[in-house]
Amino acid sequence: MDHRAAVLHGATGVQGSIIADELRRRGWDVAGLARSARPDAGVAGVDLADPEALANAYRGADAVIVQLPLAFDRRIVERQVDAVLRAVEDAGVPRSVLNTSTLLPPDEIGVPFIDGRVRLARELAGAVAATTAVMPLATFMENLALPASIERLRQRDELAHPYPADRAVPWLALADLATVVADALEAPQPPPRQVVAGPDAITGAEAAAAIGVALDRPVQWVTVSHLEYEAMLAPALGADVAAGIAAAYAAPPPPPVAPPGSVRGATTLRQWSARNLR
């Protein structure tokens, strides 16, 4: 395609800004959407629950990258999903990618944050000719760079997280997620679902050791309770979002297994830490 224009939800967020950079590197024109406009960055302010405003933003685009915000109120999530689905149909969007930000189960499970994404992935397939749900298998490396985590790392040389020390996690760099999102937009026949994981599954002790090598000092993994993690997240994310995220760690499920056809990122935790935690 000669002219490639994409509309990107959440363009000012951590995930969105990295996806935007990757698309622009590949020659895409990116029009960003966010709750608040930033004209200097090419970002328009749009209410995600307003289907008419979304359709106007989508019209003429070759692709739309949908990212739902961290919302845990069922009514809010349902309004947002309804608006996106109506807007892609009204605007005749030819191609889309849904960045789910988490691994999705096959069906709804009674958790609004998950259920909205499950429904959106399913119904986008009927509303858009070519669509892919890009799903990270596990946690993002960037979660280790939240302010409270950085402060604890610098002050105590501790890597604090709710995962048990022996849980092997394929930490994923957002740059690798962005690569998979862009690949899905450019694939002649994109898959309906694409799981992406980090290059290796490593335990907490191995993660701390990798970061220690990158920072040239010993680092220790510390498992914190989900309530302590909630308190760590709240200053940066707000009380409601922090509580919603922390609830997932109250009784964490078994480590996920990468299904056949999963994509592995190239960035190791050591490499990412050397670039982002120094």
Image (tube, helix red, strand yellow):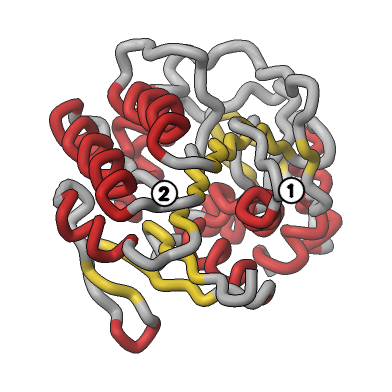
Mark 1 Cα-neighbour bin, 10 Å: few <14, some 14–19, many ≥20: many
Instruction: Name the quarter where the C terminus is drawn.
Output: bottom right
Mark 2 Cα-neighbour bin, 10 Å: few <14, some 14–19, many ≥20: many
Quadrant in the picture for residue 123? top left
Which amino acid type corresponds to the residue marked 2 in the rendered image?
Val
Q: Nearer the viewer, residue 191 or 34?
A: 191
Question: Looking at the picture, does residue 15 appear above or below residue 124?
Answer: below
In the rendered structure, the answer to whether residue 155 lies left or right of residue 264 reads left
Which label sits on residue 66? 2
Q: How far from the left and from the top, in percent, is residue 172?
A: 68, 44
Helix, strand, or loop for circle 1? loop
Q: Nearer the viewer, residue 239 or 172?
A: 172
In the rendered structure, the answer to whether residue 233 lies left or right of residue 186 reads left
Residue beneath the point at 55% across and 27% down = 103
Q: Nearer the viewer, residue 7 or 241?
A: 7
Question: Looking at the picture, does residue 28 appear above or below residue 230?
Answer: below
Q: Which of 104 and 83 is in front in this view?
A: 83
Q: Which of marks 2 and 1 is in front?
A: 2
- Give the mark nearer the N terminus: 2 vs 1: 2
Residue assigned mark 1: 219
Residue beneath the point at 43% across and 61% down = 8
Quadrant in the picture for residue 72? top left
Are circles 2 and 1 on residues that touch, CB within 8 Å? no
In the rendered structure, the answer to whether residue 103 lies left or right of residue 246 reads right
Which amino acid type corresponds to the residue marked 1 in the rendered image?
Val
Q: How far from the left and from the top, in percent, is residue 137?
A: 64, 31
Residue beneath the point at 40% across and 72% down = 31
Helix, strand, or loop for circle 2? strand
Q: How far from the left and from the top, in percent, is residue 145?
A: 56, 56
Q: In 3D space, how far apart are the residues under numbered discs 2 and 1 (Cα atoms)?
A: 37 Å
Residue beneath the point at 83% across and 62% down = 216
